[in-house]
Amino acid sequence: MNYYDIVSAIARGEKIYNLPLRVTYYCRVSTDSDVQLNSLDNQLDYYETYIKKNKTWSFVDGYIEEGVTGTRADKRPSFMRMIRDAKLNKFDLIITKDVSRFARDLEDSIHYIRELKSSGVGVFFENQSLNTFDPNSELTLNILFNIAQEESKKISASVKFGYRKAISQGHVLGSSNITGYRKDNCKLVVVPEEAKMVRRIFELYATGEYGFHKLAVKLSQEGYLNKKGRIYDKDSIKRMIQNPKYKGFYRARTYEILDYRTKKRKKNTEEDQVIYKCPDGSVPAIVSEELWDKANEVLNARVKGYADNNYWSGGVKYPFSSKIYCKEHNTNFQRSHGSRRKNRPTWSCGLYLQYRLSSCSSPIIAEKDLYNIFMKIMDTIIPEKNHIIDNMLRIYESIDKSNKYDDELNEIDKQLKIIEDKKSLALDLVLSGELRKDELKVQFANFESTIKELSKKKSKILEQISILNERDSNIEKITKSIQEEISGGSLEDFIRKFVDEIIVSKINDDRYNIKLDIYLNLIGNELPKIKGARHIDGATSDDILYLENQTCDTIEIKRTIDNLNRFTYNVYLKNI
């Protein structure tokens, strides 16, 4: 049956059990506990039997979620797969136990119910005996979803209370995956073999002779690898050295959840954490306090040394730091300046530096060549600065600056509301028999076409308003940036201030034939921090191709005398 046949039948008083439908189910438990998973098994058996015993229904395999939260649908892979399958017309009806099993967030709930309706699929909530094919169900569901959302908030508050109480009782919380320990009844128990490696880490690092990378290599040579059988990474070693549990101290409240729905959290400062020496032995020491303190003195001195040597936030010392990315692995390039290359530093992928060609065969680039390329770029941009500013001004001048935008937006919203009313009226006419279904289909196609055009027009107007709002400040920024900073600043200043990202890749899989995609932000405003490169998948709609397929050869001959690097580079400007 199609959606309109089902809705018409329900409106005539037919029971959903009597309609020939393809039926599936959705089950979710919110923890991985044995009790909950046993409950899930029982639900699966129940729903499969429940659907198959109804002779008018056709059974479709269900969707199962284990150990996930109900507060956000996008964090539930089976749920999202079910939504995609609904669009592929794989079933007509979804049965689920309760509104709280479907979703605990009101916005998500209504959004996905309407999305399923648009795909011709209904949801039957068994405990409430409600199905979304019934036009009278939405108000009741709104109320129930509101209740479920409030219940989720209460659960979150209750968990926080329990967490605080557990802390006050000295119970060890959090992950059980702590190298050197295993958890037993909210206490830590030392794992002798792992503790031996932990002590070795502290002993070596406290000497001051080992950085994280050198220490990881030393550990691997001694047979100490992580639980995946790989060499330890520097972040893991750093976290271990900083963890006071290893000297027998209790620690809790390392992070704090800011939003029950998004699970967004922040790391607390040391002052806001709960840290104290364990009197009851619930956190047994693996290393002495003296050794722990000595290792952390070395670590803190090095961090301070980075700051004193003009490292920027995040360990950025050199102009190209945190700006160059490997296209293949989306990892940062790092600077090397060993004793043999003291005056000829190079940049290469961090994976290559750790594990050599077995992990990454991306190019090695001499810093001298990077500076040479950017001198060429500056030589192009500085004479063109007035031309660039003129182009930007023309973009703004081409925008309609009338004050009719608010009126136009109001008119569009009115038209959209009229169309929604017409859609509801047309559906009522079908249910009353005054309008044929084929006529309704034509009308709905026209409605959707009009909605699409109006929405497109509305987006364009909002974009124009946004550009106009930023017009004066952006023109001022780019004028100042190009005229003062580019013309008067040094090459290093230009790179630090205006180079957003450099994406490095190979041409024809040849690591000596190098492609650089260079992204400049001449406005000079700071962009939000993200993990990895913004442009790893290429230019965005905000980027304007300024220089294309520029070429040059290496000028660093000594390092690459046998295999000379060749560069092809594109330069993109961020559109204001």
Image (cartoon, rainbow, N blue to C red):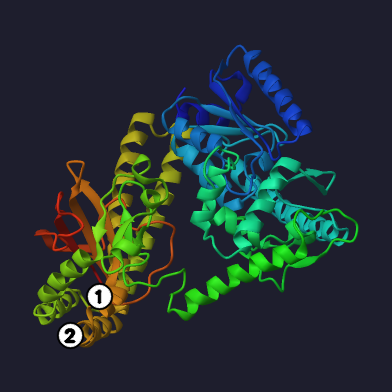
Is the Cβ of the residue at disc 2 closer than 8 Å to that at disc 1? no
Q: In which quarter of the image is the C terminus?
A: bottom left
Please name whichever residue, 20 or 315, is drawn nearer the observer in this view of the structure.
Answer: 315
Question: In front of the other: label 2 or label 1?
Answer: 2
Nearer to the camera, 503 or 49: 503
Q: Which mark is residue 487?
A: 2
Rendered image: mark on residue 115? none
Badge 2 marks a residue whose secondary structure is: helix
| Residue 144 image offset from top left, x and y in percent | 69, 47
Q: What element carries label 1?
A: loop
> In the rendered view, would you say 38 is above or below 469?
above
Q: Image quarter for residue 242?
A: bottom right
Q: Residue at x 50, y 43 (%)?
A: 114
The kind of residue tagged 1 is Leu
- For disc 1, the neighbor class at 10 Å (few under 14, some 14 to 19, many from 20) is many
Residue lying at 61% horizontally and 63% vertically, measured from the top left = 207
Q: Which amino acid does label 2 sit on?
A: Ser
**Left or right of residue 408, residue 305 in this image:** right
Q: Where is residue 344 in the image (x, y as percent from the top left)?
A: 26, 66
Quarter-of-image position of residue 398: bottom left
Residue on which disc 1 sits: 522
Using the image as rendered, state which of residue 277 and residue 88 is in the foreground: 277
Q: Which of marks 2 and 1 is nearer the N terminus?
A: 2
Q: Is residue 179 something one can see in this rendering?
A: no
On the picture, is 412 further left or further right than 55? left
Instruction: Please tell me which residue lies in front, 353 or 266.
Output: 353
Q: Residue at x 17, y 73 (%)?
A: 395
Query: Can residue 218 be seen?
Result: yes
**Crowdedness near tag 2: few (<14), some (14–19) or many (≥20) residues, C-alpha within 10 Å:** some
Q: Can you say whether 96 is above or below 452 in the image?
A: above
Q: Position of residue 261 (x, y in %)?
A: 62, 55
Q: Which residue is drawn at 85% across and 53% down?
A: 282
